[in-house]
Image (cartoon, rainbow, N blue to C red):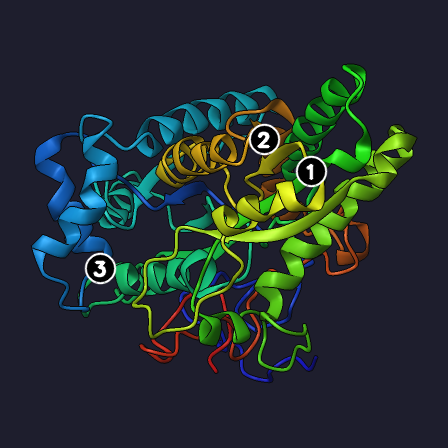
Amino acid sequence: MSTPDTATAVPYASAAAADGAPFVETPTAYDAILLASFGGPEGQEDVIPFLRNVTGGRGIPDERLEEVATHYRAFGGVSPINQQNRELLAALEAEIARRGLDLPVYWGNRNWHPTMDDAVSRAYADGHRTVLALATSAYSSYSSDRQYREDFARVLSAEGGTGLGENDDPMTIDKVRLFFDHPGFVEPFYEGVRDAVSAWLDEGRPAAEIRLLFSTHSVPMADAERSGPRDGDFGPGGAYVAQHTAVAEHIMRRLADEIPAAADIDWSLVFQSRSGPPSQPWLEPDVNDVIATLPGEGVTAVAVVPLGFVSDHMEVLWDLDNEAKQSAADAGLAFVRTRTPGTHPAYVAGLVDLIVERLEGTPAAERPHVTPLGPWYDVARPGSDENVRLGFRPAAAGLAP
């Protein structure tokens, strides 16, 4: 891919990333890290306001939001995601300190407190101007990549944000590459799969009776097809499906190498947590629908691997630990839901490795990745991760469409 001629091809970018080259191989003196996440309610009174933020602009009435609110209300109105982010923040700070890096970490959410605006304003007030963002999402899609980059652009702009990227002493925000196939992200998933399969094989269950379902959040088909760069050819489901599939294939190959009997275990990529109207096509098949078919295929045990999720937030606790587990019980299947990365040491170390890549300007050829799709780009390519309904809005850390 060609490099743009202009020195300001990427808005709100550091000098090293501003020309729009796909990989930033120049050392950059970042002075702070922005941990960016989705956010979640922390009490019953927060639930509906939070869901209004999540669905902002779609005109969804509160009575419909209340249908989703029941998931949060079952947990006292508290989403686990904020506490998980506090734990991740502490783990990152400890690993950064262990390596002797002088980098404070500021945490900001898209949909609930602490907000992105507050985090960026605090970092600016503390004197930081060259910020590297780390979002708690690993894959290409609008909601997991571009929307975060839109958040950064909005926060830094004078229109609707802080204006801190447009004043006489501007702040810049770059973003680490998507880490779907970084070894540190993949390791916890592999360990969970290995442990579940080993336990079933050790108890004498035939490999042919075991099924692995790699689960991720469903998204509208039209958006999935537009995930990844506009000029990429990733097949049905775009880069979003291709990335998940590639990671699952890697895990299965590694599993068969370590446990030869596991070579006879079948697997598939499934989807969960769809929220759109029935008339709108979303990625399928649904995890519960697939579980219901497994007894007819001679399967007696199913392990669901939450491959699209970095921690045990609501979609994992409700949609998998509740609904998918019940589907397996209804089908008479043994059920395991394997772990998410959370604060696994390999994951935390891997995230800091991604930060160090940008501090040191590590050449792309030297960056670790476990699939042929990686390493992914530092600077998003033109047309990446379009939202069909919203079109392209200003976004940091990437080239304009």
Residue to which mark 1 is pinned: 299
Residue extending farthest front: 296
Residue to which mark 2 is pinned: 333
Nearer-N-terminus badge (3/1): 3
Amino acid type of the residue that numbered disc 1 sits on in the rendered structure: Val
Q: Quadrant of the N terminus?
A: bottom right
Q: Position of residue 77 (x, y in %)?
A: 18, 31
Q: Position of residue 318 (x, y in %)?
A: 36, 35
Amino acid type of the residue that numbered disc 3 sits on in the rendered structure: Thr
**How far apart are the alpha carbons under marks 3 and 1?**
39 Å
Q: Position of residue 287 (x, y in %)?
A: 51, 48
Residue drawn at point x = 55 percent, y = 44 percent: 291
Q: Is residue 111 rendered to the left or right of residue 302? A: left
Circles 2 and 1: CB atoms closer than 8 Å: yes
Which label is found at residue 146? none
Residue drawn at point x = 81 percent, y = 28 percent: 206
Task: Find residue 303 and report its image quarter.
Answer: top right
Nearer-N-terminus badge (2/3): 3
Which label is found at residue 55? 3
Q: Secondary structure at mark 2?
A: loop
**How far apart are the alpha carbons under marks 2 and 1?**
8 Å
